[in-house]
Image (spheres, rainbow, N blue to C red):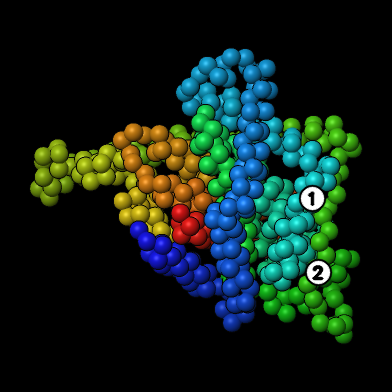
Amino acid sequence: MTFAYDLFRCLLGLSAMIGVCYFFSSNRKAINWRLVGIGMAMQFVLALLILKVKWVSMLFDYVATGFRKTLEFTSAGSQFLFGSIVNDMDSFGYIFAFQVLPTIIFFSALSAILYYLGILQKVVYGMAWMLSKAMGLSGPESLAAAANVFIGQTEAPLVIKPYLEQMTRSELLCVMVGGMATIAGSVFVSYIGFLGGNDPESQQFFAKHLLTASIISAPAAIVCAKMLLPETPEALAAVVTKDGTPEDATAPAPTKDKRLEMAADDSNNLLDAISRGTTDGLKLAVNVGAMLLVFTALIYMLNVFFVGGTDILNDLAIWAGLADADPAASWNNTIRAATGNRFEGFSFSYLLALCFAPVAWIIGVPMQDITLIGQLLGLKTVINEFVAYDVFRVIQNDPTVTLSPKSTLIAAYALCGFANFASIGIQVGGIGAIAPGQRKNLTDLGMIALLGGTVACLMTGAVAGMFY
């Protein structure tokens, strides 16, 4: 395919995503089209620099190598604890239990160290400054958007904790969408081992592209949030002061808070920071393992239920003379044959694939792969990205399935985000705990944030497809 065709597919996908945000916008007349244009331009420029400009690409390769090295550091700790079992077992279950999950714990502790030393704040501040200047965002919005790229949707709100109660609904949605459109650093590193396995080249590939995906999703998330719920002067005027009283009606017109001030780390010392990071990482690792166990079992159960139900309906249709009695012509066998045995029949996974296949096509996935990638997009939205990446790994390692390199790249980018139904509860509970006054707004904006986060990830996938 030519670059012109790839560009057309990318622009078609981006136009469709912008159209979705425009359709669901709460105030179409208030949309700041300048911000939309700048945000989309930032996506293109960042993707172009990282993927096509040699020295920038090399810089990101070095950064990706650093993330990949954390897998080796974790392996050293795992070998001390579990012995030779870490390297002697090649099955995915052992790799996941003794290599992937420990990575989450180690990187969580490492992030806590970097935050305590002030290094992470400087990186977040640099990106926040760029977003604030380029897109005209408030200071807290910019900080949250940048923090989401590195520390995830549960920790990022803590960076702007002093400002949360005074944020407008538009600013709050920007924080929520940013959290859903990106992933946390701890799970980011685990995905490298998850998808790359024990192959250093594959690990390097996913390290670079997942890092790129999380970065270029930040401006996309802002665009989606500001289209779905544009900021208005009336909303800014309704903001209360820090002591809880309304702003003086005779005061000058309110302006956005441009301060880029991050909440300080409250650890007593470096050892305390390491201890807290390790504990948080352990909780996350246990949660991830339990979540995968439960949801994988549920998907298997639903697949059996759907396929079995289809067989029963097919038998009833044969009894009524409405279907062919030849077993090869049964509905489930027809689906198996039509999909090259990629699906076991009219399963839950196949239903998701049908629903999301048009979405996969619109963001540039080659026609022969739209059902497989559609299945992944559906799993990511309905369940979560970890389950979707697990199925993605299975597809990649299946010798009977040939997934094009372009589809692999688009899937890696489009799945890179926390946009799923469970994240609504996580954000309402997490942000609501530190800003109780915003709980009603959080619950009201949950579904809108999910839509915005999903669209932002799809925009990122479309942009990545253009530069393949």
Residue 270 visible in image: yes
Q: Looking at numbered disc 1 in the image, what kind of residue is underneath it? A: Gln
Q: Looking at numbered disc 2 in the image, what kind of residue is underneath it? A: Asp
Please give the name of the residue rendered at 40% of the width and 66% of the height, measured from the top-left corner.
4
Residue occupying the far front of the picture? 54
**Nearer to us in this view, 357 or 50:** 50
Residue 124 is left or right of residue 327, and the answer is right
**Judging from the image, what secondary structure is the residue with disc 2 in?**
loop
**Nearest to N terminus: mark 1 or mark 2:** 1
Where in the figure is residue 206, as x and y percent of width and height?
53, 42
Q: Are marks 1 and 2 in contact (CB under 8 Å)?
A: no
Residue occupying the far bottom of the picture? 250
Please give the name of the residue rendered at 29% of the width and 45% of the height, measured from the top-left corner.
346
Q: Quadrant of residue 105?
A: top right
Mark 1 Cα-neighbour bin, 10 Å: few <14, some 14–19, many ≥20: many
Residue 140, relative to residue 320: is it above or below? below
**Judging from the image, what secondary structure is the residue with disc 1 in?**
helix
Please give the name of the residue rendered at 58% of the width and 52% of the height, measured from the top-left corner.
54
Where in the figure is residue 344, as x and y percent of width and height?
29, 38
State the residue position of label 1. Answer: 121
Residue 342 is left or right of residue 248, and the answer is left
State the residue position of label 2. Answer: 257
**Nearer to us in this view, 316 or 221:** 221
Where in the figure is residue 414, as x and y percent of width and height?
50, 53
